[in-house]
Each structure stands twice: as C-alpha cells, then as structure tokens.
Image (cartoon, helix red, strand yellow):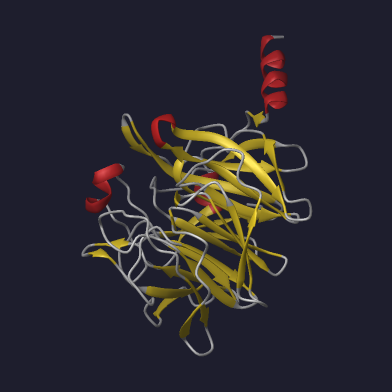
Amino acid sequence: MIRAALLAALVVSGLAVGRAAPGQATEAWRRGSEMPSVRSEIAVAAAGGRVYVAGGIGRLGTTDAFEVYDPAANAWRELADLPVALHHPAMAGMDGRLYLSGGYDDMTFTANRRSAWVYDPVADRWQALAHMPGPRAAHRMMALAGKLYVFGGVGTEPAVLWAYDPATDRWSVREPLLTPREHLAAAALGGKFYAVAGRWSEQGNLAVVEAYDPATDRWTRKADLPAARGGHTAAAVAGHIHVTGGEAFSPPDTFAEHWAYDPSADRWTRLADMPTARHGLGSAVVGKRWFVAGGGTGAGARTFFTLTDLIEIYTAGK
C-alpha cells in the first residue's frame, strides 16, 4: 500500500521511479574516439550526420578550436578555426550549416560578445551574421522551423528570447523565459523547444523546465527535472528529451545521472547513468545515438585541472 501510494505521488509530480538495471550502463553507453584536445564549456551541434565541437576552455585557456567527429569512421578532423577564441558559446545546426553565437572571449568571464556566425562545411569557412541585439554567454541556441532562437545565459536581458531569420539576416524579440537562468540545457522536440534547469545567482542550481511554442510565442511550465542542475546537457533522442551531466558548488560535485523526459506524459524517468560524471560538456544526436563530448570532471575551479577529451555515446532503445 505504501509503495503504491508513493509511486502514484511520484507519477503525478512528473517523476517515474524506475531506473535502469546496473548492467544497462555497459549496454547503452560506449566510448568513442577521443577529441583531439581536452576542453570544457564547449558548444556542440550536429549537421549532415556529423558532430561538431566549437571553442571552450583548454589547457592554455580560451580556444578557437573547431573539430568534427564522423560517427561512421569513429574519427575526428580539425576544421577552420573559429573567427575568435570563445568559451561558453552556443551552437545549432540547421539546413546543413552550423550557427554559432555569443560566448566569453577571455578568462575574465565578461559577457560582451554580440557576434553570430554561420559555418559552411563544404567551403570550410565562417561568415559573420548580423549581431545579436545584445551580448550573451552560457546561453542556448535552438534551430526550429527555419529560424534560430537564443535564450537564457548571461548578458543583456538574458531572459529575453531572440529569434534570427537567416533569410533576412535579422533578429527579433520574442517572449522571455518565465524563469531567468544561465548554464541551462535545451532540446527541440515536437515543434517546440525546452529550456531545462540551469542556475541563477543566489538561487544556485534550478530544476525548472519550460517549453516554448513558436506558433503562439508562449512559454509553458513543465514537470521539473528530478534534480536541480547547472552546466549539464540535453538533446532529443527517439521522441524523448535526454539530460545528463552538470555540477554543484556546495559541496563541489559533478554528476552522471541520466534522465529522459516524455512530453506526452510530462514525466521524467531515470535511465543508465553516463559513464563519466562531468560538466561543461555538450551533446548532439545523429539518428538514435546521443554523442556527449568534453567537459570537466571537477566542479568550479577544479574544471581547469580535470578537462577531458571524452566522447561517450548513448544509443536509444538498448
């Protein structure tokens, strides 16, 4: 009776208690070929069946490295450097191209970058776009229905949502996030995109999840992530939103917990944990595989001494 009542309460609150059996971690996750360099606070996106990793904090500080991973060959290749060295930028793939925005350009962590660029994989070349309405870092950028959306982070009016139209090279202002935050994660699914957790000044890590519908220009509150997180990553895989990684400061810790969100049930379920706990990572999806790259295994200032070159791959349906 008590167990049944507890299960019912958790389902109503949006959390499923079931989690993967211990052996599932080996079956569902595997390690890919390491990145050419260790780095954290990166931007990651997929285009043309490949996974691209931009910028970050490396052993020598801010980096302009831009590299691509080919899942079929399990191999990396270096590409044209970013126009400027950046960490905490945001990147999204759309129509075979990569779009990059904002970030910090040095280790003072001053949000002053309004820049946006597009990368052409065929020409291996970056091109500048119209500047964003204001600077952003530790934010997210999502591609949906031919437009790009920038939201969250640190900078000018960080809760405000900006939409970019590649056809006109213009930005417009949309409805702001209901809950301001930076170091958030995001994923697009079913014609909407979701802002997942993050952190905000004295409040620390948050668990709040909100969905944006471009058709109505409205945000809607969804079931909270079961654990408050910042510095984590998310992506849509096989009809669900998957979330992993992140860090906390009091006490310092990094996380490997892996959660999946079912939008039809508004419910989270815990799955096989990521093999290596880390934060400042990024991820992208190709087919039913989720590629989680980079990050630091230590929280806060320990990041600089625990940078990784990891790529760990989760296959949905295992």
Is residue 75 shown above or below 58?
A: below
Q: Which of 50 and 312 is in front in this view?
A: 50
For the N terminus, which image quadrant?
top right
Farthest residue, direction top? 1
Is residue 75 shown above or below 264?
A: below
In the picture provided, is 287 more to the left or to the right than 88?
right
Residue 94 sits in quarter = bottom right
Query: Which residue appears at 68% of the width and 30% of the height?
Result: 14
| Residue 193 x/y as whole percent | 66, 52
The answer to whether residue 71 is visible is: no
| Residue 62 x/y as whole percent | 28, 64
Query: Which residue appears at 75% of the width and 56% of the height?
Result: 191
| Residue 225 x/y as whole percent | 58, 35
In the picture provided, is 41 more to the left or to the right than 227?
left
Q: Which of 220 and 8 is in front in this view?
A: 220
Is residue 21 shown above or below 235?
A: above
The answer to whether residue 98 is visible is: yes
In the picture provided, is 197 more to the left or to the right than 203?
right
| Residue 88 x/y as whole percent | 40, 57
Farthest residue, direction bottom? 123
Residue 113 sits in quarter = bottom left
Q: Nearer the viewer, residue 8 or 217?
A: 217
Is residue 161 shown above or below 200?
A: below
* Figure disc tally: 0
Query: Which residue appears at 73% of the width and 55% of the height?
Result: 214
